[in-house]
């Protein structure tokens, strides 16, 4: 969000609808992680983040997470993703080839 204070100040909320994590490999205590976040399934009122958690040492994929969000207005109703927010989500969209 370019202006979170205005967004949240207007009573808007980003609500988690669903979250899941698929563990791919084990990690050890003190392993450093690299986390990449991409957007996908950007719809009128909702969008998803995909999280790639990799071991920094060798790039091994440790987990793949997904989180679906919707945008809610001050009255608690689903509302259209503000255009400036949608533009920013599109910048981080998952490439179709992945």
Image (cartoon, grey):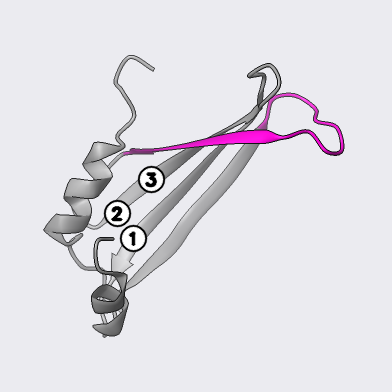
**39 or 30, nearer to the observer:** 30
Tell me: residue 60, above or below residue 70: above
Coordinates of residue 94 in the picture (x, y in percent): 34, 29
Would residue 43 be seen by someone viewing this image from the given angle?
Answer: no
Label 3 SS: strand
* The image quarter in which residue 72 lies: bottom left
Q: Residues within 10 Å of mark 1 (few under 14, many from 20)?
A: many
Coordinates of residue 82 in the picture (x, y in percent): 16, 62
Coordinates of residue 8 in the picture (x, y in percent): 31, 77
* The image quarter in which residue 32 lies: top right
User: Could you tell me which residue is drawn at 20 percent across and 51 percent down?
Assistant: 86
Whether residues under marks 3 and 2 lie with C-beta atoms below 8 angstroms apart, the answer is: yes
Residue under pointer 3: 48
Give the mark, 1 or 3, whose residue is nearer the N terminus.
3
Whether residues under marks 2 and 1 lie with C-beta atoms below 8 angstroms apart, the answer is: yes
Q: Is residue 27 left or right of residue 41?
A: right
Q: Is residue 3 left or right of residue 51?
A: left
Q: Residues within 10 Å of mark 3 (few under 14, many from 20)?
A: many
Mark 1 vs mark 3, CA separation in Å: 9 Å
Would residue 71 be seen by someone viewing this image from the given angle?
Answer: yes
The residue segment tinted magenta is: 23-40
Which residue is situated farthest in the right direction here? Answer: 29
State the mark number for residue 46: 2
Question: Looking at the figure, which quarter contains the N terminus?
Answer: bottom left
User: Could you tell me which residue is drawn at 12 percent across and 57 percent down?
Assistant: 83
* The image quarter in which residue 4 lies: bottom left
Which residue is situated farthest in the left direction here? Answer: 83
Residue under pointer 1: 70
Give the mark, 2 or 1, whose residue is nearer the N terminus.
2
Label 2 SS: strand
Mark 2 vs mark 1, CA separation in Å: 4 Å
């Amino acid at each position: 969000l370019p202006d979170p204070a205005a967004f949240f100040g207007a009573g808007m909320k980003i609500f988690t609808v669903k979250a899941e994590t698929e563990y791919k490999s084990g990690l050890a205590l003190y392993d450093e992680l690299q986390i990449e976040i991409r957007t996908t399934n950007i719809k009128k009122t909702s969008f998803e983040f995909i999280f790639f958690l990799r071991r920094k040492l060798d790039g091994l994929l440790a987990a793949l997470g997904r989180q679906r969000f919707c945008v809610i207005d001050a009255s608690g109703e689903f509302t259209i993703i503000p255009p400036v927010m949608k533009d920013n989500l599109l910048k981080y969209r998952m490439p179709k080839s992945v």
